[in-house]
Image (cartoon, grey):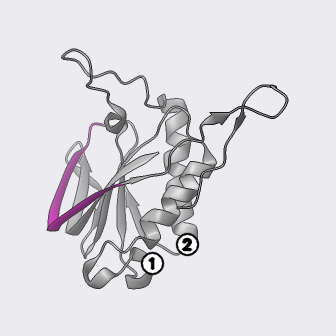
């Protein structure tokens, strides 16, 4: 799972001209991509990172400052441009797998007490923001790679390491 987190003074997302999510105070605009191998563990790790990383002014986090987050799904974060002239989207989770995981990140953030606004999954969205800094980082909760099991059995997923 991957997110581009931008420190903003305000941000909004519109669908068909209607504002569907907005933050009107300093916080984070989070563009969120889901990898085809991601699961609930990555959603929990990413939510914790987004809430606790000290990305705001004065080394504050959304948790310590009570700052809001605007979370917008963006499968294009897993576009692969290494070959040819057209990106490949094969690493991105299909919509039926990605949507529940995006919802899980939002739910995990809200369970932590965060004020979270969202875009609309799968919609053509217009995202506007006023970046603060600018200060933008890539935040990742990598899918658990398969690792061989003792005795040569089928691989088992490895736990996501310390974050």
Left or right side of 98 for 147: right
- Judged from this view, the residue extending furthest toward the front is 151
User: Does the stretch in magenta take in 130?
Assistant: yes
Return the residue nearer the eye: 24 or 138: 138
Residue at which label 1 appears = 63
Element on which disc 2 rests: loop
Q: In the rendered structure, are the residues bearing label 1 and label 2 in contact, judged by CB atoms less than 8 Å apart? A: yes
Among all residues in the image, which is located at the extreme top?
84
- Quick check: is 101 in the magenta stretch? no
Picture quadrant where residue 158 is located:
top right
Residue 9 x %, y %: 19, 72
Above or below, 15 against 61 in this view is above
Q: Which residues are magenta?
A: 124-138
143 lies left or right of 78 = right
- Sequence-wise, the earlier of marks 1 and 2 is 1
Q: Which residue is mark 2?
A: 112
Instruction: Tell me which corner region of the image, top left, top right, bottom left or bottom right, holds residue 151.
Output: top right
Distance between mark 1 and mark 2 Cα atoms: 8 Å
Residue 113 picture location, percent across and down: 52, 75
Comparing 81 with 103, the one in front is 81
């Amino acid at each position: 799972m991957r997110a581009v987190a931008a420190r903003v003074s305000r941000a909004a997302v519109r669908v068909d001209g209607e504002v569907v999510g907005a933050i009107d105070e300093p916080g984070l605009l989070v563009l969120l991509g889901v990898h085809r191998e991601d699961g609930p563990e990555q959603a929990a790790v990413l939510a914790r990172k987004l809430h606790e990383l000290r990305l705001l002014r004065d080394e504050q986090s959304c948790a310590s400052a009570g700052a809001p987050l605007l979370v917008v799904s963006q499968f294009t974060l897993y576009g692969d441009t290494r070959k040819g002239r057209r990106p490949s989207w094969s690493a991105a989770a299909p919509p039926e797998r990605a949507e529940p995981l995006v919802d899980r990140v939002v739910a995990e953030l809200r369970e932590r007490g965060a004020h979270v606004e969202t875009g609309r999954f799968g919609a053509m969205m217009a995202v506007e923001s006023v970046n603060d800094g600018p200060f933008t980082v890539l935040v990742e909760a990598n899918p658990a790679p398969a690792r061989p099991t003792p005795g040569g059995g089928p691989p088992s997923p490895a736990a996501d390491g310390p974050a």
